[in-house]
Structure formats: C-alpha cells, structure tokens
Image: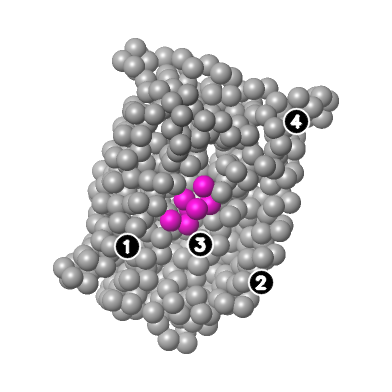
C-alpha cells in the first residue's frame, strides 16, 4: 500500500511494508531500488567503458586492480550506514517518533566519525596494499591515482548512503532514485568531459564519480530538510544515549566489518588474479561489471528485505517476516533463470562493449566467467536476502560468520586452486563459497527465536 505524506507532495510517497499483500509491497518498494542500483552501477560501468575505449586496455586493467580496494574502503562506510538505518527502520515500525529522531542523530555522529577515519586510513595504506597485491608495475601508479580520489572523499559516499538508507527506513525508496538518476547522468557527462576534453586521464574518471555523488548528497539533504520532518532531529536528540549508541554502534560496526571482511576476501582474490597477467585482469574486471549489473534485481530485493524485516520486527509481525522471505526466494529462482539465459546468449557482446577490446583473451575469459556464474545468481540472491534478514532481526555475529567463511574460502582458492587451474578456479571460487555460506545463513534464520515463534503466530 502506498500513502502520500500530509503535505501532498507528489514525489513524497512511502510504501507500507507492515500491512497489506507482501509481494505487492516488496515489488513496489524494490522497483525504485532496482532502478537506483542500475544508475548507481552506471558510475562504475561508464568509468570502465570510457576508460577502456578512450585510454586503452592498460588503464582499464589499472581500474580493475584498484577495484577491491575501492570496495574495501567504501564497503565499510556503506555497511555502517546500512546498519544504522536498520535501527531507524525498527523504530519506525514500532511508531516511536522520538526514538527514530534520536536514531537519526546518532547515525550522523557515528557515521561521519567512522567515514573520516576510514578515509585517513585509506590514504595511508593504498600504495602499500597495491604493492602487496602484486599489481603489475606498469599499472601501479595509474591504479593509485584512481583510488586516491575515492579514498579522499569517502565521507561523501557515506553521506549519500546514509540519507538513502534513512529514507528507505521510513518506506521511501523513490526519492533516492530521483537524486541518483540526476547524479548518474552528471557522472557520464563529467567522465567524457574530464577524460576526453581536459585529458585528465584515469584521475578524471574518479573525480567525476566523486562530484556526481556529492550532488546526490546535497539533493538528499535538501529534500529531507524540506519534506521529511520525521527524519529531522533537533539539538536535544543529539544528547548521547549510552544504550542507543551501544546498540547502533554495534549494529553499524557489525555490518561495516562484514562488508570489510568480504572486501578483504576480494582483495586477496585480486592478488591471485593479478598473477595471471594484465589481459586476464582486464577481462575479469569487464566480466565483473556485467556480473554486478545483473546482480541488481537480487540486491534490490535484498535491500527491500533489509527494511521489511526491521519494520515488522518493530511491529511484532514475525510470521509476516517468514512469509516475506519465502516470496523473495521464489523471486530469486525466477530471476536467476532469466539472467542465465541472457548471459548465455549475449555475454561475449557485453564484454566487448564494456572493455572496448577485441583481444580474444579478454573476450574468452570474460564470457566464460558470465556463463558459469549465471545459474548461481539464485544462490547469491537467497544468500543476500537471508543475510539482510538476520541483520534486520538484530543478529550481529551470524552474518559476520558467513563473511569469515567467504574470506577463508578465497584464501584457500588463491593458495591452492588458482595456481593449479588458473582463471577457471577464479570463476568457480565465489559460486562454491556462496553455496556454503547460504547453508549456514538459512540454518541461522530458520532457527532464530522470532522465526520459531512465527510458526504459532496467527496471521495479522
């Protein structure tokens, strides 16, 4: 059910995830998230495509080599933001307006301090990490110049994701989409202008991304100040509440560390990939861009679940949570079948478009990666949604355990399988790990006390 806010603003709409048909609510809420994710990926997609087409395979490989560090830096900041917004969604579900405003105030303080620390640490460690990762010498400096600007402006990335997360927490997934579309289009224009017209090279791609993301932050803040009174804390709400700080800090750090552990695994995997040569790196990064694009329908539903679950926890509707996950899993199976068919038919063409290359090593490796990974999207979707559901249930350690499983698995593949089987081991690394993680997460979800209680709960 969709309701308009009291000021009758046409664009100020909230989706009711606590009442009404579950499938309809999840789909309505997830569609803007899906479109938002598409435009968000356009940042990275056009960076890659424009770099590949304008600057060549070597610069493309430089972006690819720096991607795991990008994910490590930004992932921690985004993870904290998502964790903080889960507490806000729980407050909204319980209809506690004062607690919600305190949650927003606490989120701002914790998030800004954390993202500044991450930015400083990133700037100090980028070059050593790239060296440890065995980044080829002829792309090392380009990789550093690209990721430097991303690390410098980590707080900007955090602020957007916090604003978007808080809007989602109250059921508004539409307005973040509007802001993101504007900033994504700006990013495309700036990419071309800075790289082609001003000859800023690989740094131009990074600076374009930062500027465009900054615009989305400004638009989000203006909108919240003008239209979402419930998300505007007053001075009194910033007064420290020790229990709330403890709850939100533990929730935020849990998701932040989870994202970081996943990203550390990606950094380790990148070490193994770098040893296979820069053409393999270029092919892999092109394939990963396509992989990320096709992952959007699954991630969008997972983000919907991340709001759906805590809102219903706040409203004490536990059976609705269990039913919502069942619907989401069926969605995963259907979407995975569609994606697999598309990748079987068009994977090689997509790699050629993104990389701007006709090199057979790039095209063959990238295409093979997509064809094999395609069917495993169903597993990945269930994994993501179950993980977000557990976080929404207030579980902080169980999702971390799944991340540790992923980290250990990637270490084993880099040390044992990639040296023996080359890029084929890279392709199978994550799908095999996803299966193990999903089994652990599903067991944790269905043995959770709220889900056990839902079996005897009457439909409300």
The relative height of residue 330 versus residue 108 in the rendered view (above or below) is below
> In x, y percent, where is residue 225?
33, 28
The relative height of residue 292 versus residue 5 in the rendered view (above or below) is below
Question: How far apart are the two marked residues, 3 and 1, measured between alpha carbons?
Answer: 17 Å
Badge 1 element: helix
Question: How far apart are the two marked residues, 3 and 4, measured between alpha carbons?
Answer: 32 Å
Kindly identify which residue carries mark 3. 293
Which of the two marks, 3 or 1, is nearer to us in this view? Answer: 1
Considering only order in the chain, which callout, 2 or 4, is on the residue closer to the N terminus?
A: 4
Neighbor class of circle 1 (other Cα within 10 Å; few <14, some 14-19, many 20+) is many
Kindly identify which residue carries mark 2. 341
Nearer the observer, 144 or 289 = 289
Nearer the observer, 72 or 405 = 72
Kindly identify which residue carries mark 1. 188
Residue 188 seen anywhere in this rendered image of the structure: yes
Asked where in the image residue 444 lies, by quadrant, the reply is top right
Which of the two marks, 4 or 1, is nearer to us in this view? Answer: 1
> In x, y percent, where is residue 346?
57, 77
- Quadrant housing the N terminus: top right
Q: Which residues are magenta?
A: 32-39
Considering only order in the chain, which callout, 4 or 3, is on the residue closer to the N terminus?
A: 3
Residue at (22%, 72%) from the top-left corner?
196
Nearer the observer, 384 or 406 = 384
- Quadrant housing the C terminus: top right
Residue at (47%, 57%) from the top-left corner?
38
């Amino acid at each position: 059910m969709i309701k308009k806010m009291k000021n009758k603003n046409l664009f100020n709409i909230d989706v009711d995830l606590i009442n009404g048909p579950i499938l309809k609510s999840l789909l309505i809420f997830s569609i803007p998230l899906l479109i938002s994710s598409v435009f968000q990926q356009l940042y990275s997609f056009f960076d890659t495509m424009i770099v590949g087409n304008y600057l060549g395979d070597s610069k493309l490989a430089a972006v690819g080599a720096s991607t795991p560090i990008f994910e490590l830096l930004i992932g921690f900041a985004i993870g904290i933001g998502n964790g903080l917004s889960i507490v806000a969604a729980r407050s909204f579900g319980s209809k506690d307006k004062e607690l919600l405003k305190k949650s927003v105030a606490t989120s701002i303080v914790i998030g800004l301090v954390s993202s500044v620390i991450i930015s400083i640490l990133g700037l100090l460690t980028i070059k050593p990490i790239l060296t440890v990762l065995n980044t080829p010498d002829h792309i090392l400096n380009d990789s550093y110049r690209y990721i430097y600007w991303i690390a410098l402006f980590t707080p900007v990335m955090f602020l957007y994701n916090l604003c978007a997360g808080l809007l989602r927490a109250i059921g508004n997934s539409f307005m973040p989409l509007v802001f993101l579309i504007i900033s994504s289009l700006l990013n495309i224009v700036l990419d071309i202008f800075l790289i082609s017209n001003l000859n800023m090279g690989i740094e131009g791609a990074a600076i374009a991304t930062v500027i465009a993301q900054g615009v989305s932050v400004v638009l989000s803040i203006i909108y919240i100040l003008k239209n979402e009174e419930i998300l505007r804390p007053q001075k009194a709400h910033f007064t420290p509440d020790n229990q709330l700080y403890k709850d939100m800090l533990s929730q935020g750090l849990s998701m932040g560390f989870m994202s970081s552990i996943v990203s550390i695994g990606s950094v380790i995997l990148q070490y193994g990939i770098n040893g296979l040569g820069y053409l393999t790196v270029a092919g892999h990064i092109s394939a990963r861009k396509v992989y990320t694009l096709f992952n959007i329908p699954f991630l969008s539903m997972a983000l919907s679940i991340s709001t759906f679950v805590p809102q219903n926890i706040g409203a004490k509707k536990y059976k609705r949570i269990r039913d919502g996950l069942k619907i989401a899993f069926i969605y995963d199976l259907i979407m995975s079948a569609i994606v697999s068919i598309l990748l079987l038919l068009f994977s090689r063409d997509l790699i050629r478009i993104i990389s701007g290359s006709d090199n057979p090593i790039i095209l063959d490796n990238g295409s093979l990666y997509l064809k094999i990974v395609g069917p495993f999207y169903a597993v990945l979707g269930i994994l993501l949604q179950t993980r977000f559901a557990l976080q929404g249930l207030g579980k902080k350690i169980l999702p971390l355990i799944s991340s540790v499983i992923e980290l250990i698995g990637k270490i084993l593949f880099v040390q044992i399988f990639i040296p023996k089987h080359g890029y084929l081991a890279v392709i199978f690394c994550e799908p095999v790990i996803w299966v193990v993680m999903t089994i652990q997460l599903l067991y944790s979800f269905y043995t959770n006390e709220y889900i056990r209680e839902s079996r005897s709960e009457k439909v409300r």
